[in-house]
Amino acid sequence: MNDLIIGAVLLFTGNAAVFAQPTHDTHRYGTCQQFDVPINASAEGAIFDLTHIDDNISARSWAIIEDTRTTLRGADRIIKNITISGTFNIHVQLCQPHSSNGAGAIQIATHGGHYDSRYWDSKYQPEQHSYVEAALKAGYPILTYDRLGAGKSDLPDAYSGVQAGLELEILKELTLMARNRSIGSGSTASQSDSPRIIHVGHSFGSFLTSAFIATYPELSDAAVITGYVATEYLALAGYTPWAAQYAKAAQRPFDRTPGYIVNQKSGIQNIFFAGDPDTAFTKELLDYGDEIKQPVPIGELASGYKLVGLPGLNYTGLLHFMLAEFDTFVCAGDCNGVTNATALKKSYPKAAALEVDIQPNTGHALPLHNNATAGFEVSFDFLKRNGF
Ligand SMILES: *[C@@H]1O[C@H](CO)[C@@H](O)[C@H](O)[C@H]1NC(C)=O
Ligand SMILES: *[C@@H]1O[C@H](CO)[C@@H](O)[C@H](O)[C@H]1NC(C)=O
Ligand SMILES: *[C@@H]1O[C@H](CO)[C@@H](O)[C@H](O)[C@H]1NC(C)=O
Ligand SMILES: *[C@@H]1O[C@H](CO)[C@@H](O)[C@H](O)[C@H]1NC(C)=O
Ligand SMILES: *[C@@H]1O[C@H](CO)[C@@H](O)[C@H](O)[C@H]1NC(C)=O
Ligand SMILES: *[C@@H]1O[C@H](CO)[C@@H](O)[C@H](O)[C@H]1NC(C)=O
Ligand SMILES: *[C@@H]1O[C@H](CO)[C@@H](O)[C@H](O)[C@H]1NC(C)=O
């Protein structure tokens, strides 16, 4: 009993101290706060057989080795199984809409590789490119966070400190905290029941979101999976087009340990920007996509296989897949015809509703293309039609 009380007080004091920091919030359709949440988590991980990266040449060699057809993948490259556990500081942004849509749901959005939570909240033309602004405008509270190993969250060892299973547990903890309102209360605090949770993902964040609804189906009420579907085309483009540098030695260096790589700008374009170059995106959007890029720890990539293609046989929530039409990473450049709702229903037989849409003339970084807001609306329409 005493322990519980002390725990609650610490949590409260921790948040209160952070809330006291002045933040200049520029959001138009809601109010946002940024703070760090300490999260205890533990998961099975592994020491993988990986290239040691501590300069530009070894970074490029890593990609070439990864793309070699005979290189071992998945569990076959495990040298040793380990348990990864600790208390990790996770940097979050929590936003409450000025006017709620009354659905009593909160979105939790998980970004992909090469980015942090800013992926969801463009400061460049936010009215056209910030998913957070669009969600607030549509009346949804939204929690975004920097995944472990990215942005302002903790940046553990790149080989064995940041792995898929651990990140899944961190998402679980954030979800439990949103459900019991130890974060994310605000405008919905008057309601005594738990808020419904809408999990949103992009790319590696969608690996996590889809694995989450497969592993913890009872903890998610709706999922919006963007920039990911598990087909034979996923990651066919390989790692070489990333034009990886060692993060610490990059043209714009990052303070990171060995094993963190960062794309050159050409690699950012190769993976994230596609469609008709005259109409799909602008030079400014590509500049912005390069400006907010983040290093990636290679152990996370090596462990990603654990998250991919898990069927959600017990998932009873809503499910929306939003694919970018010309996604290089997910569909080898063309998502038309790679999947459909009938095919996916086999993996999610109990989903309350399932829809697949393709955002036209768009590459992998969906928010950073010209018609982004119309794409966000497609997901919100799906949610609203189904009671969220
Ligand atoms: C987190 O883990 C540490 C070390 O195992 C433990 O002392 C602490 O009580 C845990 N905190 C919570 C909130 O569970
Ligand atoms: C690691 O654990 C997996 C099962 O989780 C097992 O299949 C594999 O053989 C183990 N690998 C090693 C090297 O111990
Ligand atoms: C809410 O959930 C979190 C995550 O599981 C837990 O650490 C915390 O103690 C819970 N808080 C309350 C008030 O139940
Ligand atoms: C690594 O490569 C980048 C891009 O070519 C270059 O700007 C940087 O100077 C290189 N770093 C070192 C230490 O050579
Ligand atoms: C689905 O739920 C049933 C019963 O609740 C359980 O026995 C089964 O293991 C679950 N299947 C999966 C894939 O989680
Ligand atoms: C949907 O996918 C299934 C399985 O791949 C295929 O058999 C079916 O023809 C597709 N339906 C449409 C309308 O494309
Ligand atoms: C913009 O996106 C919407 C939603 O996907 C789509 O209906 C519309 O055709 C797109 N407009 C253009 C010019 O691509």
Image (cartoon, helix red, strand yellow):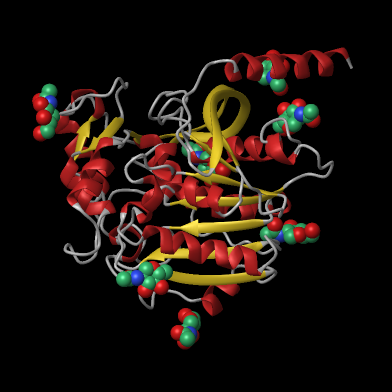
Which percent across, then down, holds residue 200? Answer: 54, 51
Residue 77: quadrant of the picture = top left
Residue found 41% across the figure and 36% down from its top: 116
Q: Is residue 71 above or below residue 149?
A: below
Judging depth in this view, the residue of 382 and 312 nearest the camera is 382
Judging depth in this view, the residue of 317 and 125 nearest the camera is 125
Residue found 67% across the figure and 68% down from its top: 386
Residue found 18% across the figure and 24% down from its top: 249
Q: Is residue 149 above or below residue 201?
A: above
Please indicate whether residue 180 sits to the left or right of residue 173 in the image. right
Which percent across, then down, holds residue 138? Answer: 57, 55
Q: The N terminus is located in which quarter? A: top right
Q: Is residue 75 visible?
A: no
Residue 78: quadrant of the picture = top left
Residue found 49% across the figure and 22% down from its top: 23
Q: Is residue 344 above or below residue 23?
A: below
Which percent across, then down, holds residue 203? Answer: 42, 52
Q: Is residue 69 visible?
A: yes
Please indicate whether residue 52 sits to the left or right of residue 345 in the image. left
Q: Residue furthest right?
A: 1
Q: Is residue 85 above or below residue 218?
A: above
Number of callouts: 0
Q: The C terminus is located in which quarter? A: bottom right
Please indicate whether residue 89 sits to the left or right of residue 248 in the image. right
Judging depth in this view, the residue of 287 and 62 nearest the camera is 287
Which percent across, then down, holds residue 158? Answer: 38, 28
Q: Quadrant of ligand 7?
A: bottom left
